[in-house]
Image (cartoon, grey):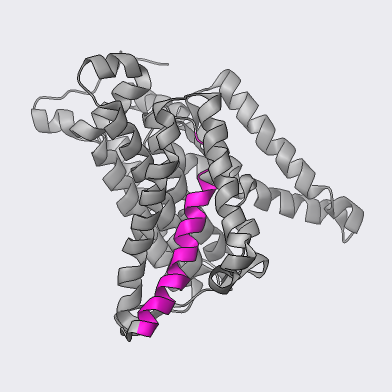
Amino acid sequence: MINGNLKASYAADERILDNPYRRGFVFGAAALAAALPFVANDYIILVAAQMGIMLIAVIGLNVVIGYTGLLSLGHAAFIAIGAYAVPLLHRLFAAWGLPEGVMPLLAIPLAVAVAALVGLVVGLPSLRVKGLYLAVATLSANFIVIFLIELDAMAPFTGGFNGINTPEANILGWRLDSQREMFALIAGLGFATILLVQNLFRTRVGRAFIAIRERDYSAEVLGISLLRYKLLSFAVSAACCGLAGALFAYFYARILPEQFELALSLQLVAALIVGGMGRTMGPVFGVVIIVMVPELLKYSFGAIAGGSADVAALRAPVQEIVFGALIILFLMFEPLGIAQIVDRWLRSLNRWPFARG
C-alpha cells in the first residue's frame, strides 16, 4: 500500500508525475538531454543518439510484450523496414520532383506506416498461438525480412549484402548534417514517443491491451475483440520500431542488413527485461544499461589489454555473457526490472521519515 501521497482531486489522481521526486527526475532528465549537445563531446553525443534510437524501439517492444503480454523476438525486422524505407522513399520523391526540404516530413511518417502494416501481418499468428510458439513465429519474420533485403532480385533497391547509402535529413531547409543536430531530433521524438505511448494506456485501447495481458479469454468474455486489439498492439509496436529505423537511416551514412539481425532483437528484449516490462520508465533504464555495458567493457578491456589483440578479442564473448547474466539475474531477483527498484526508492523518499521499504 502506498502512503504519504495525498490526492484531493480527480486531476491529482490522474497526474502521471504525482510527487515532487518523480517530477524532479523526469524534468532533470529532460534538462540533461537539452543541454547535452552544448556541453558533451562528439563521442558522448554518438552514444546518446544510439540510446535514443534504441529507446524508441524498446518503447515499441514494451507495447507488445510489457503491456499486451505477447512475446516477440523479431522486432529488429520492423527497424529494418523503417530504415530501408527512408532511402527508397527519397528516391521516389526525387523522381517526382519534390523539394528536398519536405522529403523527411513525408518519408518518416510513411516509413512508420509501412512498418505498422507489416506489424499487422506479423501479428496474425498471435490470434492462434502464444508464448514460445509466438516468439518463434515473430523470429521467423525477422529472418524473412533480412532474406528479402539480401535477395539478389531486391539488390537494385536495397543494395543486397553491400547495403545502401542513406540521405541526409533536410527539414524545411534545416540540414541535419551533424550528429549534434540529429541528436536534437532523436531526443525530441524520443520524448514525444514516451508521452504518446504512456497516454495510450490511459485510454480504452491501452486498457484493452492490459486486459489481454492479464487473461485474454476473460478479456474476450468482457467484449474485447482479440483480433482487433492484438493486431493493433503489433501495429503500434511496429510503428515505434519503424520510427527508430527511420532515424537510424538518417543518423548513419550507410545501412547494412547485418545491422538488423537476431542480435538486435535480443538486445531490445534484454533492455526491456533489465529496465522493467510494462513500466513507462523501464525502456529508459534498460537502454542505458544495454548501451553502456559495451562501452564500459571497451574501456576496461582497453585498459587491461594494453594493445594486445588476443585480450581485445575476448570482449565480444564477454559482452554476450554479461547480457545473459543480467537477464538471468533480473528475471530471478527483480522481474520488474530497474524501474521497480527506482520506484521503490522514490516511494521511500516520499514517505520519509514515517515509513520505510
Residue found at x 31% / y 85%: 99
Q: What percent of the width, then of the height, locates residue 210? A: 31, 26
Left or right: 202 as drawn, with respect to 182? left
Q: Is residue 348 above or below residue 52?
A: above
Left or right: 62 as drawn, with respect to 298? left
Residue found at x 79% / y 56%: 302
Left or right: 318 as drawn, with respect to 68? right
For the N terminus, the quadrant is top left
Q: Which residues are magenta?
A: 72-95
Residue found at x 63% / y 25%: 329
For the C terminus, the quadrant is top left
Q: Is residue 44 above or below residue 66?
A: below
> Foreground: 146 or 42?
146
State the image quarter where residue 282 is shown.
top left
* Count of marks, rendered view: 0
Q: What percent of the width, then of the height, locates residue 264? A: 59, 48
> Foreground: 29 or 221?
221
Residue found at x 62% / y 57%: 259
Secondary structure mainly formed by the magenta segment? helix
> Does the magenta portion include 75?
yes
**Furthest residue in direction front, as rendered:** 153
Residue 258 seen from this side: yes
Left or right: 296 as drawn, with respect to 202? right
> Foreground: 137 or 64?
137
